[in-house]
Image (spheres, grey):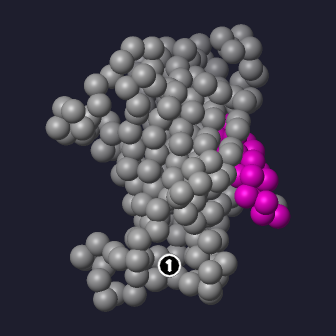
Amino acid sequence: MRPSGRLPDQLREIRLEPGYAPYAEGSCLVCFGDTHVLCTATVQEKVPPFLRNTGRGWVTAEYGMLPRATNRRTDREAARGKQSGRTQEIQRLIGRSLRAVTDLGGLGERQVILDCDVLRADGGTRTAAITGAYVALHQALAGLVAASLLPALPLREPLAAVSCGLIEGEARLDLDYAEDSTAEADANFVLTESGGIVEIQITAEQAPLTSRQFGAMHELALHGVGELIRRQQAALGVAA
C-alpha cells in the first residue's frame, strides 16, 4: 500500500490554473498533490546574441524554491551569491524540454522566459514545473497569435512530465517525497502527446534495473503523461 493510499498507476490530485499571474503573458499554477509550482511566461522582443539575425527564437527557463517550500527554511540562492548545481540542472531541463516542442523558426526573433517558482515541495517539483510551464508557454504564444504577431501557434505537440519509481519491487507513478526518499530506483520522464521521448532521467539506488523494470516504469509514465496532457488541454480550452 502506498503511503497516500493511491494505486500504483494513479497520479496525485492534479490542478492546473492558467492565468494565475495576471501580469505575465502566460502563467499557470500547477499542483501535483502537495507540490505547488507557479510558472510564468515572459515574451521579449529580442534573442540571445548567438541568435541575432537568424530569424529564430529561443525558449529558456529559470527555476527556484521559496525558502519555506519545505519543512525547514532554505536560504535564498541570491543571498548565497550563486545557484546550486541542482537548480541549474533543473532549469536547463525545463528549457530543453520546452524547446523540443517549440518551432523556434516559427517563433521569430523573440525569446520566451519561463520562470518556475516552487511554493510547496513534496517531490516531483521538476516534473510539475515542466507540465505547468507548457501551459504558460502555450498561453503566451496564443496571445501572440491573437495579436497577429504570429501567423500560427509555433508548438509541435503537447508535452508533460511525470516521475516514476520502484518501491519494494513495485513500479509506481508520480512519487511524493515519502516514496521518492526511499525508492530503489527513481526516474523522471518528459514525453510528448504522441509518446515521443524528450528526456528520461533514471537512477538505480540499490541494484541495477532490469529491462522489465524499466519497461514497467515507462508504461506508467506514458499513462501518466497522457492524463496530464488531457488536463492541460482542458485547462487551456483546447480540443483533445
Quick check: can you spot residue 134? no
Q: In this view, does 115 lie above or below 41?
A: above
Q: Residue furthest front?
A: 23
- Let me know if residue 236 is in the magenta part: yes
The part of the chain drawn in magenta is: 217-239
Task: Kindly indicate the quadrant of the structure image that contains residue 54.
Answer: bottom left
Residue drawn at the location 78% of the way across and 63% of the way down: 238
Furthest residue toward left: 81
* Spot occupied by residue 114 in the image (x, y as percentages of width and height): 46, 56
Residue at left offset 32%, top offset 36%:
86
Give the main secondary structure, helix, strand or loop, of the magenta stretch: helix
**Which residue is rendered at x = 66% and y = 11% of the image?**
3
Number of numbered labels in the structure image: 1
Q: Name the residue under label 1.
A: 107
Residue situated in front as seen by the camera: 201 or 149? 149
Residue 90 left/right relative to 21: left
Position of 63 with respect to 194 (left or right) is left
Which of the image's four quarters has the C terminus? bottom right
